[in-house]
Amino acid sequence: MNTPAVEIQNLSVTFTGPDKTRVEAVKNISLTLTRGKALGIVGESGSGKSVTARSLLGLTGGHVTADTLNILGTDATRLTEKQWRAIRGTKVAMILQDALNSLDPLRPIHREIADALPGSRKHRKRAAVEALHAVEMPAPILRADQRSPELSGGMRQRALIAQAMIKNPAVVVADEATTALDTRLTRMVLDQLAELKDRGIAFAMISHDLAQIAQVADDIIVMRHGEIVESGPTKQLLSDPQHDYTKQLLAAIPRGVARFAPLSQVATFDDTTATFENFKDPVDVREPSDISAIEVHGLSKAFGDHAAVFGVSLSVPQGSTLGLVGESGSGKTTTARMILGLERPDQGSVRIFGQHFAPAKESERRDLRDRLGAIYQDPLASFDPRYTTSQILINALSDGTTSRSRQYLKRARELLDLVELNSSLLSRSPRELSGGQRQRLAIARALAPTPDILVLDEPVSALDVSVQATVLDLLDRLQLETRTSYLFITHDLAVVEHMSDRIAVMTQGELVETGTAQQIMHAPSHPYTQQLIAAAPDWNP
Amino acid sequence: MRMASWLARRVGAAAFLLWVVATVIFIAIRMIPGDPAEAIMGGPGSQASAEALETAREQYHLNEPILVQYVLYLGQLITGDLGTSYAQQRPVAQIMAEMLPATLQLTLISLAIAWLIAFLMAAIAARSSRLGQAMGTVIEVVAAAVPHFWLGAMLIIIFSTWLGWLPAVDTGTVQGIILPALTLAIPLAGFLAQLMRDSLVTAMSSPFALAARARGASEGQVFFRHGFRHAALPALNLTGWAVATSISGAVVVEEVFARPGLGRSLLGAVLSRDMPMVTGIALFSALIYMVVMLLVEAVEAIINPAAARGHDV
C-alpha cells in the first residue's frame, strides 16, 4: 500500500527558445506521490510548478531528464509517445484550471469528458452522465448535452474533475483547480479533491495559494525559479517555515493581518537586523472624516428581465475604504460601473462629494469625473497596445493628447515614482511589463488626474501572492499619503478584510449586510454572510 | 416559434436589401450618359431612325417622369418580371436560367477546391517549424493577392501551352473546368488559409487541447476533434463573402477561358449597355449572396449552438 505511486529523482526540464537559448524551467527536483496522500506544490508564476505537473504526463513540451521517473512501477524516463498515451488519462490524469477554454466551447461536455472511453457513443454518454453525477453536477443529464459557455465557472470546474476521473486513474494532478472560483465553490471543489485521497488516489495539488493547499495537502513542496526551496509535512512547514522565501509567502497572505500593516518584506527581509514583527506595526494615521466621498442611494439596474442590482445604498467616507464583496454575478461590477457613470442606473442616485453625479448629463458631471479613477483586474486590456508607458501616462495627464511637453514627462516620472516603478520603464510597451508592474502602471494612470476616489474592481485577483502583497501595500501607502477614498471590490475575503474599514456584502444584486470589517468577518449577522465566512479556508498555521 | 420569427426577420431584411439594391441599380443606370433608346436599337453604331428611337422610348416608358419609371420598374420586379434583354430581345430570366448552371458549377467547384487547399495549407503550416510557418504565410499572402486575369493567363501558359495537359478554352468537359476553377480558387484559398491557420494554431495550443492530450488523445484526434472545428468557424463566416468574390471573379475568369456563364453575360451586357440584363444579373447576385448568408448562419448554429443562443465563446 505504501510504496510510492510516483517517484521522481533529480528531474530537470529544459526548453529551447527560438534563438537557441536554453531555459531550465525545472532543476533537479525530487518528489514522491503516495496512494491516499496529497502533495501540495506551491509557487508563483514561473516557478516551474506546472511544468513539474505535466512531466507526470509527458506533456512538458521540453527536454526532460531524470535519474528516476517512476510512475506506478513503469520507468517513464524513456517512453515513446504511444506508451505515454496509454498512461495519460488512464493511470495519470490532470485536472486543469477552469479557464473558459479548458473545455472545448464547440463540443458538448459529455464528449469532452468521455471521448477517451471505448465503446459505443451511447455507452460513453451514459458514463459521462454518471461521472457528472459523481461530482455533484446539478441536472447532469441536461448539463451533459450543453457546451462549456452555457455552464457556470463552478460547473465547468466540476466537469473538468469528472473528465479527469472518468477512467479511474491512480494518480491525479490538479493544476490550479480552485484558482478562478468563488469562496463557496472553492470550498466545494477542495472538499471533492480531498475526497480523492479517501479513494486511495495519489494526488498532487498545484496552486499559488498556500491557504488552499493547506486545506488538502499532507505534505507541501515550495518551488521558486524551478527549484524546490523547502518541503515538509503541511503543519510543520506552515508553523515553522525554514526558508526565507516560504516565510515571505506566508507573510504575504493578508488573512488576519491588521489594516495598513505591510504584507511584503521582499526587499528588506534579508536584512538580518530586521525582525518580522517590526514590519507589522499598524500605522493608521488617518483622522475620521464626516464628508462622504461616495453616497449611493437606492441604486437599481436591470438587463432585460434580469435585475442585476436592486436597491443598493452605501457610502464611503473620505479617506476610507469600503470593501464590496460578493460572488461572481452578485452585481458588484454593475454597481461599480454605475458609480463610475459608465452605466445609467434605472433607479437611485450617486453623489460624489455631495454633488449629484448619476444619473446626470455628461456635460454636467465632466468636472466630477476627474475626481474618480478606476482600476481593473486586467490592466493590459485597457492599455492601447501601441502606446508606450510614457504615452499612456501623458495621455492620461493631458486629457487625451499625446503632447511631448517636458512638464508632462516630469509628472509621468513622478507618477512612476509614486507607484514604485523605475522610470526606465517609460519607453517600454505595457506588454513587456510583468503582471505586478502593469497593475502599478494602471494605478499610476488612474492617479494622473489626481482623483479623490479610486474604484478598484478585483485589482489584485490576477496577481501572485507576493506581488499582490506589494500592490496592496502600495494602495495602503497611497491612501495614508493622499487621503484617497477607495471602493474596493473583490471576492477574496482575506484581501477585503485587510484592506477595508467597512465591508458591504452583495448577493444576487442586493446588498445584504454592511458593517465594520471586524463585524462582518467575526460576527456576521446575515445568513449569506455567515455561509460565505464559513466557507473561507481556516488559516491557523 | 423562435425558428419562425428568426426566419421571418431574415426574409424581411433580405427583401429590404433587395429593394435597396434595385434602387441603387436604377439610379446608377440613369446616371450613365447616353440615350438608352440607342442601346435598345443596337447601340450608337446602328444608325437607328428618329422614329425608331421614339418608338423604343414609348415601348420602354423612357418618356415618362423618372418617378413613374421607378414605380413601373419596381412593379415589374415585384411580379418577378426582369424585362427583356435589349441586345438579345429575349426575356432576361430565360437567358439567366440558361447561364446560371455553368456559373454555379464553376463557383461551387472553386469554393470546394479553395476550402480544400486552404485547409491543407493551414494544417501543414500549423504543424511545421517556424521557418515553414513563415513560408506558409508568404505563400498565403501571394496567393491572396494575385489578380484573376494574371493567374488565369499563367495557368493557361503553364498547363495548356507548355505542358499541354489541360485545354485553355472551356470545352464543357471535366478537364475544361479545372483551370478556370483553380483560377478562382487560389486567391480565395490564400485568404481562407490565413484565417484557418490562425485559429488552428490557437486551438491546438489552447487549454482544451492540452486537456485532450492529458486524457490520452493522439495529435490526430486533437486535430480532428478540436482543431478542425475551430479552424472551420471563421472561414465559414466568410463564405458569404467568398461566394460574392467568386461570382465577381467569374466575370473575369469566364471571359479569360471563353466559358459561357452569368459573369460573361454581365460583361457583355455592360459593354452593350443592355440595362435589363445588368439589372437582372446584379439583383440575382445579391439574392444569391443573401441566401448563402442565411445558410452559413444555419450551419454555424449547428457547429456552435452556444454562440447562436447568444453566449460568448
Image (tube, coloured by chain):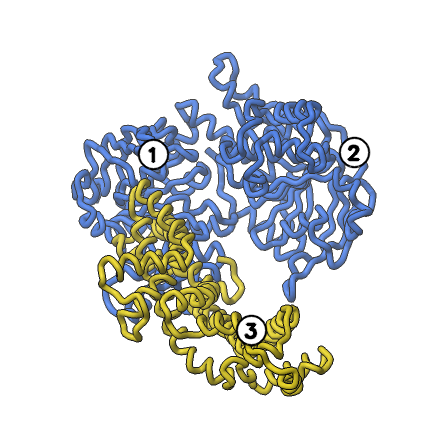
Name the subunit of mark 2.
A
Picture mark count: 3
Residue indicated by mark 2? A289
Residue indicated by mark 3? B273
In the depicted structure, whether residue A100 falls above or below residue B108? above
- Labels 1 and 2 in the same subunit: yes
Residue indicated by mark 1? A18
Task: Indicate which label's residue lies in the foreground, 3 or 1.
Answer: 3
Q: Residue at left 69%, top 47%? A: A514
* Colour chain A appears in: blue
Q: Quadrant of residue B130?
A: top left
Q: Is residue B199 left or right of residue A531?
A: left
Is residue A40 or residue B48 the one in the foreground? B48
Classify mark 2: residues with Cα within 10 Å, few (<14), some (14-19) or many (20+): few
Classify mark 1: residues with Cα within 10 Å, few (<14), some (14-19) or many (20+): few
For the residues marked 1 and 2, what is the alpha-carbon distance in whole angstroms? 57 Å
Horizontal and vertical percent for residue B128? 29, 46
* Colour chain B appears in: yellow
Name the subunit of mark 3.
B
Q: Quadrant of residue A379?
A: top right
Q: Are marks 2 and 3 in contact (CB under 8 Å)?
A: no
Q: Residue at left 18%, top 48%? A: A83
What kind of residue is marked 3? Arg
Is residue B213 or residue B226 the one in the foreground? B226
For the residues marked 2 and 3, what is the alpha-carbon distance in whole angstroms? 82 Å
Query: Split into 4 quadrants, where in the image is the N terminus of chain A?
Result: top left
